[in-house]
Image (cartoon, helix red, strand yellow):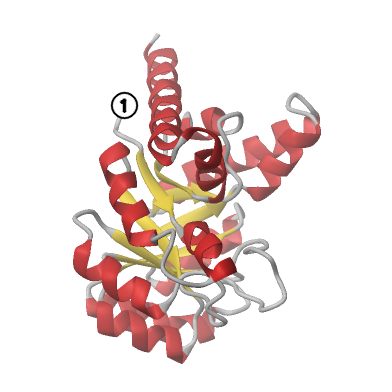
Amino acid sequence: MNRHLRLGVNIDHVATIRNARGGLHPDPVRAARMAAAAGADGITAHLREDRRHISDSDIERLTAELDIPLNLEMAATDEMLEIALRHRPHAACLVPERREERTTEGGLDAVGGHNHLQHYVIRLRESGSRVSLFIEADRPQLEAAVSLGAPVVELHTGAYCEAFIEDPNGERTKNCLRRLQEAAAEAEKLGLEVHAGHGLTFDTVGPVAAIPALAELNIGHFLVGEAIFGGLDSSIRRMRALMDKARAEAGGARSA
């Protein structure tokens, strides 16, 4: 079956541009509405502890005004849990977070942090949010997600994208992609819904979108950057088309 691959658009860096100067422009909620009109299946927003981009008021407005699902990326802290329980987003993705990092660097350690994470997974699931863990494509991390009761994992695609920039056809790129493929298949066998994201571009999305076990890709920074040159609507529609093309070709190859 060639199932629809969902696209979640991360609007964090619309807020980054707004915050660079202050004020209200550009508005992340307006960007979210435009993303929905262009073919996004959901919106992702990361409320960081230092509020460097998305703000509390952004989350409040997104929750109230969106007609498509909101995926709240959050650190496993009591402050973020309280916010998530108050707003009850459709989905909550637990991610690692360090104040000095520019962006999320690597996946969550669900193995080493199992006991800490358990409380957050339970509370978020009880509130009705679909809980996911942003992890590396490793079997122990997948097994930890199952043990924690998280129904979804999002595989970190950063290593693959970095390898692709250095050499699209190199062994490192091939190995990183193979690792994602194998982890996605294993996660599906374990009963997990599988998502992926981080660093994906027009050039790198195809091989990832072709992975049959994947249900959703989350892409943000690149789309916002491309919007400077061609508009947000155009960048999202092109990404949507590339995803659909890769998924259709992969489905045709499997049935041949």
Front residue of this view, candidates 214 and 64: 64
**Residue 119 lies in quadrant:** bottom left
Mark 1 lies on residue: 2
Q: Position of residue 250 (x, y in %)?
A: 44, 21
The quarter of the picture where the C terminus appears is top left
The quarter of the picture where the N terminus appears is top left
Residue under the point 48% across and 41% down: 185
Task: Identify whether 242 is placed above or below 64.
Answer: above
Task: Identify whether 156 is placed above or below 114.
Answer: above
Residue under the point 50% across and 40% down: 227
**Visible residue check, residue 76:** yes
Q: Position of residue 122 (x, y in %)?
A: 34, 81
Front residue of this view, candidates 57 and 149: 57
Q: Residues within 10 Å of mark 1 (few under 14, many from 20)?
A: some
**Residue 254 lies in quadrant:** top left
Q: Is residue 136 left or right of residue 128?
A: right
Q: Position of residue 82 (x, y in %)?
A: 35, 88
Task: Identify whether 234 is placed above or below 246.
Answer: below
**Visible residue check, residue 151:** no
Front residue of this view, candidates 68 and 255: 68
Amino acid on which disc 1 is placed = Asn
Spot the residue most to the top.
256
Q: Is residue 138 left or right of residue 196?
A: right
Residue under the point 49% across and 44% down: 184
Task: Identify whether 127 is placed above or below 194.
Answer: below
